Image (cartoon, rainbow, N blue to C red):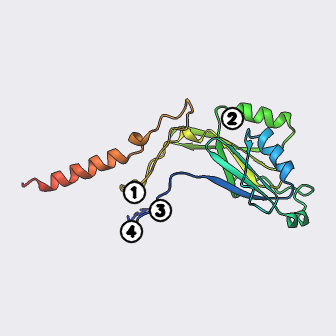
Amino acid sequence: MIVEIEEVMSSYQALPLLSLNHVSLLVRDVWNSVRFYEDVLGFCLVKRPSSFNFHGAWLYNYGVGIHLLENVAMEDYDAINEPRPINPKDNHISFQCTDVEVVKRRLEEMRMRYVTAVVEDNGIKVDQVFFHDPDGYMIEICNCENIPLLPISSTCPLKLHNIGTSHNKFTATSCGCETAEMMESLSKDMLNFSF
């Protein structure tokens, strides 16, 4: 099977984004969810604007915020008594970790249900652990930095940030961007040769 990938050049420029700021989640009980995100995932409660006229909480750590918004209508859904299956293909939030085995031991100590998966690409393995928060949102913990981020497009608008793990060996220079630019330049130079 031959698959052709056509690069489509857009006449529009991408939005001037910097990074992911926060993920907002509707929750049944704000303080129960705050305890989960503090105790299990290590987030810290931070001040939120006083102008909000609804119950919620903001947490922050690892360069991203979690905004919890209380929605009493969620009480109609009995996710706690009837937990959804833990499905790695479900919508989820993923966090990188330094040691997947420690994550699994800690979840077992807290008697939390989880499933594991292993992704492999060219001999590189990524260990994944999936579990639910109190409202049934899927959380993934992984060592995903093991797999390099290689852009498919030669235009490479990829902006990488050093996330501070000892395993992260990839910087903007190794994402393929410079290689793609060098190859494109070499190709243009070769076209200028006369035979």
Residue that label 4 marks: 10
Residue type (three-letter) at the residue carrying disc 1: Ser
* Residue 97 % position (x, y): 65, 36
How far is the residue under mark 4 from the one under mark 1? 12 Å
Asked if one can make out residue 89 in the rendered structure from this viewpoint, the answer is: no
- Which circle's residue, 4 or 1, is located before the other in the chain? 4
In-image side of 45 versus 177 (left or right)? right
Q: Quadrant of the N terminus?
A: bottom left
Count neighbours of disc 4 (C-alpha within 10 A) and say few if under 14, some if 14 to 19, many if 20 or more. Answer: few
**What residue is shown at x 57% (from left), y 33% (from top)?**
165
**Element at badge 4?**
loop
Quadrant of the rendered image containing residue 62:
top right
Front position among marks 3 and 2: 3
Q: Which of the labelled discs sits on residue 153, or is there none?
A: 1
Residue type (three-letter) at the residue carrying disc 2: Val
Please tell me which residue lies in front, 70 or 99: 70
Residue that label 2 marks: 100
- Which circle's residue, 1 or 3, is located before the other in the chain? 3
Front position among marks 3 and 4: 3
* Residue 93 % position (x, y): 68, 51
